[in-house]
Image (tube, grey):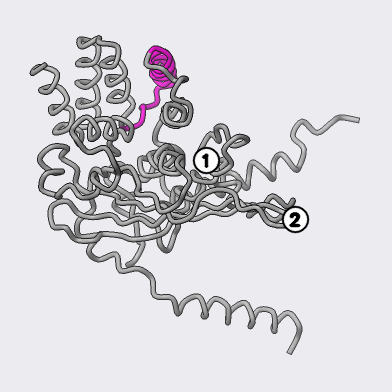
Amino acid sequence: MSRGRMALGAALATLVGCATIPPPDYSGYRAHVPRSILVLPPQNETTDVTAPYDYLATVTRPLAEAGYYVFPVAVIDAFLKENGLPTAGEMHAVPLGRIREVIGADAVLYVTIEDWGQKYRVISSDTVVKARASLIDVGTGETLWTGIAFAQQSSAAGQSDPLAMLIAALITQVVSSATDPAHGLASTANGVMVFDRNRGFLLGPRHPGFAQDVRGR
Amino acid sequence: MVTDPEPLSVRRAAGLASLLAGVLTVGCGPGPLYYWGHYEPLVYEMYASPGKALPAEQIDELTEDIATAQAKGRPVPPGVHAHLGYMYLQQGNAAAAREQFEIEKGLFPESTVFMDRLLSRMAAQ
């Protein structure tokens, strides 16, 4: 067997290995593709107080570009605070019926920040952003989609993922990343979360490819 | 010797960028749906540095973005007019706020319930 063939065999074995992870079930999501998504301010399991807003300030773009109406995140945050819900925990506890009545969203994206910011090691520092998210149908309470927004960048040269970097450059204007490295990374994480071919969101009704999206079929 | 107006590396980068854009939009559509301008950076800034991105500045930037989008013939993204309306509300300019909430509703009927909620709350005050 030639070396090339062995390499091909190894590559195929790797692909088969990946295929054992079951693809998410899109049947419920496909049956109730929402027109609009309400992104509530995320709950925060980290000590980084800026994390929820890094996340919130980078999630509208990929969701809207995927074809959904996304409620204005800062207006929603202010509106809920003015209506006696000062924390994300309280906002996440609002019953779906009330959300439908007051905001009229078809689906809610509930996000929890798990890991955020710079980790200093002996010779390098890594910046990590990680959040778990669930898209819930407001009408039925059904979970349409769950997933992780994740991105990591090492300070050591050449170790950052070039694909992720390019995606970040394409889908966002990276702002203040020098002073807040997690902010730029957050847009990468949200972009991948929404557009990942195997585990991302279905295209929404405002996207021209809505009818042809074959994910999960 | 004539210099190559477009060096290979540039063409390669452009090719890679368009390929990636294709991957990102799942092979459909001609690129971004919206002209984004400063909307998300402003949302970031109003939380990250509350002293900056005051309503007056945000109104200026978003108004400029909307004009730029119009000049380019591109739509503005969901939420921009609602956010602008909210900034007018912060300034006490109810008429301008109402106008922006109505525009958001017209462009994105998905926002109707929430925009009507904001409008009726203003009327009650």
Q: Nearer the viewer, residue A119 or A108?
A: A119
Whether residue B36 is visible here, answered yes or no, is: yes
Give how far apart the Cα atoms at labels 2 and 1 are. 23 Å
Q: Position of residue A7 (x, y in %)?
A: 69, 79
Secondary structure type for disc 2: loop
Residue picked out by circle 1: A183
As drawn, is A27 to the left or to the right of A164? left
Tell me the kind of residue under disc 2: Ile
As drawn, is A89 to the left or to the right of A148? left
As drawn, is A148 to the left or to the right of B15? left
Q: Position of residue B123 (x, y in %)?
A: 10, 17
Q: Magenta residues, as a range?
A: B56-78
Q: Quadrant of residue A143?
A: bottom left
Q: Is residue A174 magenta?
A: no
Please tell me how crowded label 1 is: few (under 14), some (14-19), or many (20+) other residues with Cα within 10 Å.
many
Residue picked out by circle 2: A123
Mark earlier in primary sequence (2, 1):
2
Decide: is A36 above or below B116: below
Which residue is rendered at x = 62% and y = 77% of the image? A11
Which residue is rendered at x = 30% and y = 48% of the image? A204
